[in-house]
Image: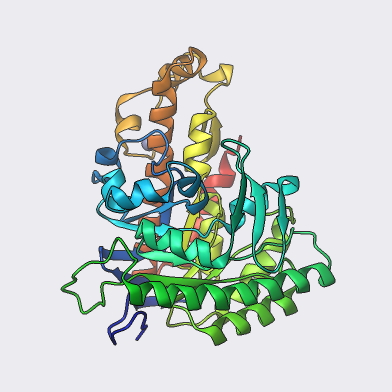
Amino acid sequence: MITTGNDNKPAIRFDLIAQEGEARAGVLTTRRGEIETPVFMPVGTAGTVKGIRFEELESEELDPKIILGNTYHLWLRPGIETIRECGGLHKFIGWQRALLTDSGGFQVWSLGALRKIDEEGTHFRSHVDGSAQFLSPEISMEVQAALGSEIVMAFDECAPGNATHEETLKSMSLTSRWAKRSRTRFDQLQGEGADTGRAVTTNCLSGAQAIFGIVQGASHLSLRRESLAQTVEIGFDGYALGGLSVGEEKPVMFEVIREIAPVMPADRPRYLMGIGTPEDLIDAVAAGIDMFDCVLPTRNGRTGQAFTSSGKLNIKNAQWAKDSRPIDELCNCSVCRRHSRAYLRHLYLSGEMLASILLTHHNLAFFLDTMRAVRQSIRSGVFHKFRREFTERLNANGE
Ligand SMILES: [Zn+2]
């Protein structure tokens, strides 16, 4: 049982339903409903999953049970006082299902030359107005309590994918000290009732927020194992693999995932942060990952790129000019049922906003459908067959 907060009930519950090799199918119960895993969480950076209305997101063909919010973006704009006064993030944006918020650590780290990291936290310049800002584990926990997300992420520091052993060790040790400070401040805030999303639940949960710890260590497996041990020692409701897809080669990234995911605590959800393509998701599921988020379906949708069962499709290509087929002939989403490649290409080249909206919709449908099929295949004991067929279809065409 996972326990957070000042009563003995857990903040979340994680039940494994089926396992095939390392691949797991489970149910993550939160104060705002059940989430079947493995799960893909669409990214709602600034309180919106870009290019799609919440009604559509909630419709049966998409239907994610959880989305992400970004602490860094929401903290800088509209600001935490505004969100708190509007009743927390769920109420502010009009989304009653579960939310996971990141800690802001990665966004601040991505600012590169614009930030300076010391023991206390990170000093940086706001990308919104250039003002001097400071983010620390304590502040991140305060912001995430005000947002009222179901799952809070510890504040971490990321080392670049090609960081040396020495640099990585330094960064990882800082992440570990910050994880402790995150945990301490998180517990205080739960005790003080600072969580705006606190709910009365009927499912034997405490109604409080849950907090996940983050494993760092770049591509150094020994440091990854050390980081995992330190994070588990502090104790979290779930564990994430962070600091991947930050400049290292893909085989290196998958070596870390394959070595570390299976030894992460089996009774807690395992979350791979910020990754990846549909085939990456399936490969990581095979290593024992339960949760994913990525901007690819929404971001690539806005730049004219569609994900399909036979690989990526660039809608700008002249070869689609008179093509009456849907983006993906195997996709049953409303965009593929109604519109042709020729029409979508025309919209994109004309700069029509509907191009982004329709491509985003299809891409989200494709990611979410793929994960539905992954869950079903694990539950039926045919995941490895599903994975092989998915890969074969993808490689049969390949743009
Ligand atoms: Zn579609």
Outermost residue to the left = 202
Seen from the viewer's position, the closer of residues 280 and 236 is 236
**399 in relation to 17, above or below:** above
Seen from the viewer's position, the closer of residues 382 and 283 is 283
**Image location (x, y in percent) of residue 277:** 55, 49
**Image location (x, y in percent) of residue 110:** 66, 49
**128 in relation to 21, above or below:** above
Which of the 4 quarters of the picture holds residue 229? bottom right
**Image location (x, y in percent) of residue 222:** 74, 79
Q: Which residue is located at x 35 percent, y 79 percent?
A: 5
**Image location (x, y in percent) of residue 343:** 41, 17
Which of the 4 quarters of the picture holds residue 168? bottom right
Q: Is residue 304 visible?
A: yes
Q: Is residue 12 visible?
A: no
Quarter containing ligand 1? top left
Q: Is 195 on the left or on the right of 106, as rendered? A: left
Q: Which residue is located at x 49 percent, y 58 percent?
A: 102
Quadrant (top left/top right/bottom left/bottom right) for the N terminus: bottom left
